[in-house]
Image (cartoon, rainbow, N blue to C red):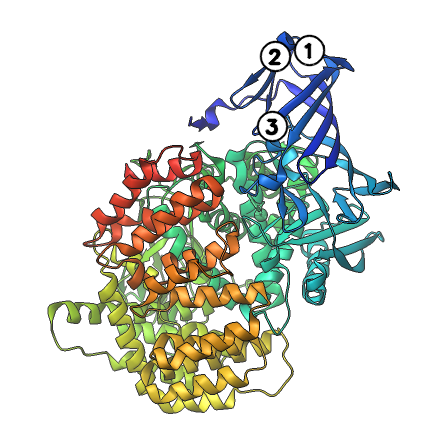
Amino acid sequence: PGTIYLEDYQAPPYLINRTELHFELGEEDTIVTSRLHLLRAVAEDVPLQLHGQELELLQVSVDNEELAEEAYQLTDDGLLIHQLPEQCVLSCKTRIRPQDNTSLEGLYKSHRMFCTQCEAEGFRKITYYLDRPDVMSVFTVSIEADAKRYPVLLSNGNLLETKPLDNTRHWVQWHDPFPKPAYLFALVAGDLEHIEDSFRTAGGRDVTLRIYVEPKDMGKCDYAMDALKRSMRWDEEVFGREYDLDIFNIVAVDDFNMGAMENKSLNIFNSSCVLAHPDITTDAGYQRIEAIVAHEYFHNWSGNRVTCRDWFQLSLKEGFTVFRDAEFSSDMGSRTVKRVEDVSMLRTAQFAEDAGPMAHPVRPESYIEINNFYTLTIYEKGAEVVRMIHTLLGEENFRAGSDLYFSRHDGQAVTCEDFVRAMEDASGMDLGQFRRWYSQAGTPILSVTDSYDAESNTYTLDVSQRCPATPGQAQKQPFVIPLAMGLLGDAGNLPLTLAGQETDHETEDNTHKVLIVDQERQQFVFDDVRERPVPSLLRGFSAPVRLEYDYDRSALCQLMSRDDDGFVRWDSAQALALQVITEVQQQLSSGAAVVIDPLLSGAFVQLLEDTSLDPAMVAEMLALPGESYLAEQAGEGAADVDLIHRARAAVKQAIGEAAEQVLLARYQALSSVDAYQPSGDQIARRALRNSCLDYLACANGAHLGLAHAQFLSAGNMTDRLAGLRALAFYGAANDWAQPLADFYQDWRHETLVVNQWLQLQAAMPDGGALDRVRGLMEHPDFDLRNPNKVRALIGGFAGQNPVNFHRTDGEGYRLLADVIARLNSINPQIASRLLAPLTKWRYYAGRQDMMRGELQRLAALPELSPDVYEVVTKSLQ
Ligand code: HT7
Ligand code: ZN
């Protein structure tokens, strides 16, 4: 497969002003007839190269005249047509087989339902087209199908007409007045039911809202509907964005490659990201649904009204929309907790991506398969880049920039550069050097040292930045890094006066500053500092960088308990735990006696004793850094999975023992008899209670009884699963075998719960995990063609069970590679995503050859999909 380069971008030679599609849905095949209203956009007569994949061409005509065979050519990736008039209607009739489409791209069947997924390049599997985001067209779509099997026929925009055809079939027509690229096209046909609600926009438009599901799921739509209405109101209030059509539909589908898709007015969702009920959905599940419903809705402006010129600009819509959905979630719940969750994920997974073989800038310069670039870098780091612009410009200027971006580019397909320019133009700020965040890959390292002069009362921060080399980028230029900070003194945060700068008495908060680090080395001197402070650095995680500052443990404890910034309090707890776990690793590997610093358990006891603190925040602070994060922190060639596991478990056990009384007290006090609500307050209480249970069960087998009792009596899925997980992680087989079997019996009719059951068993650290996973692959509820099941069982094993995935006999790697080899032809997108844990081979001491060996085995397979080929070959370089 070939590489595509950003620098080769050329505007399309033809436009498609209008697109008419007709679908004849059948049980054997589907016939698609297109009428494309073409206009040549260049002076000279160039042939038209339409994209097309896995299509059977039945007929092609221009202005109603069937084309002779020599007038066109079928090529490897589409249809080439010579000598077209400057303006014409090109019509193609093609046959496709959605029933056989296991890639879940284009038109496919999920159970008895037809549905589409066109982003990024799936439309070309439906008909011949200019399948690129800068070709925007007004779509009119008619669908005919058997009326009994498919009573509901949906597409984008407004329903124009519906009529019965003969005694078994019916016909509908939809029209979307907004020009859109093909990747936003959608079609759904099935025997679906829906709930309905309405929303009045700020401008007075009444919008009908519907959520379509299979009849069995009708009781699980209400939460998503409420989340949708909250999102619509929030986008009006915070970004001034109103919905623009009279109808907004969501459809839930069981077989889906990702979370959801923002097709214009017809969002299609993975059922796991929309269906909710207290019996089957955990608190985390509810929060995820709210965030994803919001994310897809927000795309109506950031993605649909203003879209991407080409796929190198993907972060233009994804980074901005993730930033928007994170702001929404922060406003709906706790801002600090949301920030902590996002940063924790970014530092564990995106930093690893940035340090690995697939590292790429937020705006990549080349790719082989675009599906491989729906990454944490594009989404999460892209959102961090937008967040930094927000920090640099301030709330008001940022909103002005966003307004200008939307008004200037409404109806256009644009670039990241256009976004940054709108921000500059609205604020008057120069973001010239800041643009490097879009073009340079890798995570910058911000190194800070300090000194205090008690005579002159000056405190100096020496800051330097560097960024490791990434594939194709050996040298990096300095980034613009907003470094939010404060100084902690004995009685709290100190007032800040930067030498040479007037003190701004106007600002309410003179204990917080954002320093702009834009050179390799810089010095910041603070005057009038009356005591040696502890620096509170990178507040709110103001930039996606690795911070190096040599904190001693007592400084970390001070920040943890007293700093004004919630993120720094959490981060200090993480840093303290990291230091202690690393020390225990060293003790274990040298054979020295294991001594676990009581400072950590003491600090955690203090946190637990303080009932004035937000329980959700306490739960976050008690969460020890995960094993993947610890491996990432160890660095290349230095991660010893077994040692990490043992050290982390020992520290956890020590905390559980030292804090036993307060853990028990809080566990009891936080119990609730209230009816389940996914409210912030209840979620926070359950989070802390289950974190207490986790420590207790880890520390002392006697507390497994608590876990078992909770499992049996829980009135909601969060508590039930937390009880089961504690038994499964800390008990012996006779503690968990029966509860796991009972759980399956109770919930086997709920696919989404069965997936949780698969995932839990895949992640259990006991020595039987590999055989159990192999066994579960044969379970009637496992299906290699369903991405949710593959993610739960195989993804759960490779991503959440480090000790078993990294078995010394290499069997864990073999299992993963075997599955990838099978999925390569079934669903290349999922196959390629599953590869991620193998690509991290450089980290793992003593395992590198085995991991590479599996990658080499995959590389040698015949007929490797471009998706898998790209990741495997780049990982082996
Ligand atoms: N814009 C969408 C990205 C996407 C996708 C979604 C579902 C299936 C396959 C997909 N390929 C790309 C989802 C989003 O970011 O909102
Ligand atoms: Zn998105």
Q: Nearer the viewer, residue 423 or 326?
A: 326
Label 3, secondary structure: give it: loop
Q: Is residue 296 visible?
A: yes
What residue type is disc 1 on? Leu
- Please state which of the two labelled residues, at mark 2 or mark 3, is closer to the viewer: 3
Q: Nearer the viewer, residue 288 or 151?
A: 151
Give the labeled residue for mark 3. 55
Label 2, secondary structure: give it: loop
The residue depicted at 47 percent of the width and 64 percent of the height is 341
Residue 417: x and y in percent read: 54, 34
Mark 2 → mark 3, Cα distance in angstroms: 20 Å
Mark closest to the chain's N terminus, 1 or 2 = 2
Q: Is residue 610 visible?
A: no
Label 1, secondary structure: give it: loop
Q: Nearer the viewer, residue 535 or 9?
A: 9
Q: Are marks 2 and 3 in contact (CB under 8 Å)?
A: no
Q: Is residue 52 left or right of residue 646?
A: right
Image: 116 above or below 90 = below
Give the labeled residue for mark 2. 47
Label 2 packing within 10 angstroms: few (<14), some (14-19), many (20+): some
Mark closest to the chain's N terminus, 2 or 3 = 2
Image: 209 above or below 561 = above
Does ligand 1 reach within 8 Å of label 3's beta carbon? no
Q: Are marks 1 and 2 in contact (CB under 8 Å)?
A: yes
Residue 385: x and y in percent read: 49, 47
Q: Specify the label residue 84 is tagged with.
A: 1
Number of numbered tags placed on the structure image: 3
The residue depicted at 71 percent of the width and 51 percent of the height is 240
Does ligand 1 reach within 8 Å of label 2's beta carbon? no
What residue type is disc 2 on? Pro
Mark closest to the chain's N terminus, 3 or 1 = 3
